[in-house]
Amino acid sequence: MKIHMPSKQFLINSLSILIAIAVLLTIVPAVYAEGDTPLSAIPGLGRPNNNTLIRMHKQEGTWYSEQEVLLKQADTLAANFQTLVDAQSKEGKNVTILQDGLAAFRSELAICKEIHLAAGATIFSLVGFKANGDVRDRLAAGQSLIDGRAAIKDAHVRLAIAVTELRRSFAHWRQVRNPFDRTPRPTAYP
């Protein structure tokens, strides 16, 4: 008795179909790993995935902490500048330019601190995020990230301008005090 084996073509076709099914079963779940729907767009951010949103949230927390250090250093700068003003005043020199510059700096520093606190409230309020840091609502999380970043940037720019203006007031005071002082100043470059 002779056993009839299926043809080679039939075996190859069957094996091809099994391989195709295996590939589909491994690829399709990976495509929809974050959900059954495509990522929704977040105005101003595009379509970042949830891991990117979580990473951005952590980065903003780091920026907030770094800015807190800068604001403390600005307080120290204001205290040191006040010491300079007091010392020059005791020597009988006119320090009105320095006092005006310091008053403007302290005023701007107070505004920067308020903006910084508002940024902290936005970043650490967890709007759109779960307590463990995962994304709960993509749109709310994205808006929270945009608002936090804008507030941190605003405080940073204002602080940089305030420091520059304080330095200008000191340079102006030096120039007014001794207009013929043309000695070269040390620079970072030779």
Image: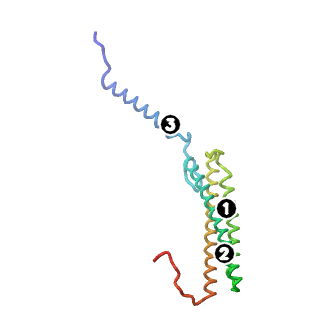
Question: Percent x, y for residue 104?
Answer: 69, 75
Name the residue nearer the viewer: 45 or 108: 108
Name the residue carrying label 3. Answer: 29
The correct choice, above or below, for 58 with respect to 163 in the image is: above
Question: Percent x, y for residue 75?
Answer: 67, 68
- Of marks 2 and 1, which one's residue comes earlier in the chain? 2
For label 2, the crowd category at 10 Å Cα-Cα, with few meaning under 14, some 14 to 19 and many 20 or more, is some
Name the residue nearer the viewer: 40 or 190: 190
Q: Residue at x 60, y 89 (%)?
A: 179
Q: Residue at x 41, y 32 (%)?
A: 20
Residue furthest bottom in the image: 180
Describe the element under mark 3 as helix, strand or loop: helix
For the C terminus, give its image quadrant.
bottom left
Do residues under tags 2 and 1 come within 8 Å of each other at their CB atoms? no
Circle 1: residue type: His
Residue furthest left in the image: 2
The correct choice, above or below, for 34 with respect to 17 in the image is: below
Q: How much space separates mark 2 and mark 1, taking CA atoms?
A: 23 Å
Circle 2: residue type: Phe
Question: Percent x, y for residue 35?
Answer: 56, 40
Question: Percent x, y for residue 189?
Answer: 47, 76
Do residues under tags 3 and 2 come within 8 Å of each other at their CB atoms? no
- Tag count in the figure? 3
Name the residue carrying label 2. Answer: 81
